[in-house]
Image (tube, rainbow, N blue to C red):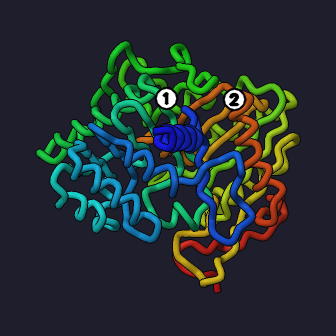
Amino acid sequence: PLMSVTVCFFLALFAGVAQASDVEIVESVPAETVYGSQQTLRPTDVWPAMIDGARKTLDIEEFYINSLGAMGPVLDAVKAAARRGVAVRVLVDSKFYKKSHEAPDMLKTVPGIEVRLLTMPGVQHAKFFVVDGREVYVGSQNMDGLALTQIHEIGVMLRNGAMAETFLGVFESDWSLAAAQAQGASALSTPAVAAGQGPLNSFRPVTIGGAKMYPVFSPVSLLGPGYESEIDALFRLLRGARKSIHIQVMNYGISVYGGSGMWTDLDSELKAAAGRGVQVSMAVADWTFANKTDAENLKRLSATPNIRLKYSKIPRASGGFTPYSRVDHSKYMVIDGKTSWISTSNWQKDYFYSSRNATIVAESEDLARKLDGVFDATWNGPYVRDVTADMTIEPPEIASPRK
C-alpha cells in the first residue's frame, strides 16, 4: 500500500540522518558550563549507540569502570549485548581495580562477559573499545559517570575495519598478557599482535571520512613490529610544526612518578618550536598545580618567547563540591590547523614509557577546525587564567574542597 511505502521511506530517511559519519569528535560537557561545541557529539549518545550496534564482539580496554550516574545506560547496553549473544571482553587496570571494583565484578556475573585485570609497569591507562572489529572509540574519557557529565573530555569515534584491526592487535596482546599474569607470570613484556597486513602507522595510514589517520601507542617497551610509539610520533609532529601548536592536556610535567630526576624532553621540543617562530598555546588543568615541581616549571616555561600558557579551573556545580570532577581532562593537540592529536595520555614521562595509552593522529583541516573550535572555547572562555612567572599557585580542589 502507498501508506506503507511512504512510512518506510521516511523511516529510512530519518535513519540515514541519525547515522553518524565514519569520523566523529565526541566531547564530554560538564553540566552548567559554556562548553559543548555544535560540531561535536556527546558520549552519552555515542557510547550506547555503538554498543547497541554490536552483533558479534565487544572488546573494552579501560583504566577503570564504575556505575556512577550516566554510566548506568552504558553498562545496561553492555549487559544487553551479552544477552543477545555478543562475546564481550573487558580489560581494566589491576591497580585501580582495587579502588573501583564494583562495576567490573558485576559485569563478571553476566553470562557472555569475561573480565581480566592487566598489570603494567605504570598503569593500563588506555581508554578504547572496539565493536565487531569495525568501529573504534578512543579518547580521554574513563568509563566513569563523572567523565560523561561533570568533566571536560575529548574522544573520537571511527568506523573503519583496518583501524579496528590495529586496536585489536593491542587488545589481544594485553588480553593474553593479563591471562598470563593471572597464572602467576611476572613478565611485563610481550609483543603486540600484528594483525592482517600489519598495523596502521604514519607510513601506512588509512583514509576515513576524508581524513588520513593512524594510531600510535604507549609504552615504548610493549609495542610489537609496526606499532609506532606515542612519544616518537609526538616529537616528530612537534618538530614539523611551522606556524602554531594548540595543546590542551590535564597534566603537563617534568617530574617522574616514583623516581628522582626530571624529564625535560617535552620542554625542549616546545622551546625548540617556539625558537623557530611557532606560536605555542597550551592549556592545562589546575590539577597540574598539585605537584609543586611541575607548577614551578610551568611558571618558568611561560616566560619563553612564543609560548603562552593558561590553566583551567571549572567552577563547582550548583549542587556543591564533588571529588574528582569539574576538571578539564582532555588530551588533544592541533598543529598548523591541519594535524590533530586525540589521546588518552597526559604529557608526563610515565604515560609514554610505563603505561598503556593510545592516540589517534589525523591529517584533516576539517577535523582540525572542529578541534580548534573546542580549543578556542577553552582558551577564550571564562574558566582559564594565564600562567605567569610571578603567579601565586592555589592548591586545586581534587579529592577535597580547598579551605
Is residue 342 shown above or below 76?
above
Closer to the camera in the image, 160 or 154: 160
Is residue 2 shown above or below 276?
below
Q: On the rendered image, what quadrant is the N terminus found in?
A: top left
- Tell me, for residue 65, which label it has, or none: none
Q: Residue at x 67, y 64 (%)?
A: 286
**At which x and y percent is residue 381?**
81, 60
Seen from this angle, which residue lies furthest front?
Answer: 1
Q: Quick check: can you spot residue 78?
A: yes
Mark 2 = which residue?
Answer: 339
CA gap, disc 1 and disc 2: 17 Å
Q: Quadrant of residue 263?
A: top right
Closer to the camera in the image, 123 or 102: 102
**At which x and y percent is residue 234?**
61, 31
Q: How many marks?
A: 2
The reply to whether dot 1 and dot 2 touch (C-beta < 8 Å) is no
For badge 2, the amino acid type reads Thr
Q: Residue at x 32, y 36 (%)?
A: 171
For badge 1, the amino acid type reads Ser
Q: Quick check: can you spot residue 138?
A: no
- Quick one: SS at disc 2? strand
Horizontal side of 295 relative to 47 (left or right) equals right
Horizontal side of 297 relative to 115 (left or right) equals right
Tell me the crowding category of disc 2: few under 14, some 14 to 19, or many 20 or more residues within 10 angstroms, Cα based.
many
Sooner in the amino-acid sequence: mark 1 or mark 2: 1
Mark 1 = which residue?
Answer: 229
Q: Residue at x 58, y 54 (%)?
A: 42
Seen from this angle, which residue lies furthest left?
Answer: 183
Horizontal side of 32 relative to 242 (left or right) equals left
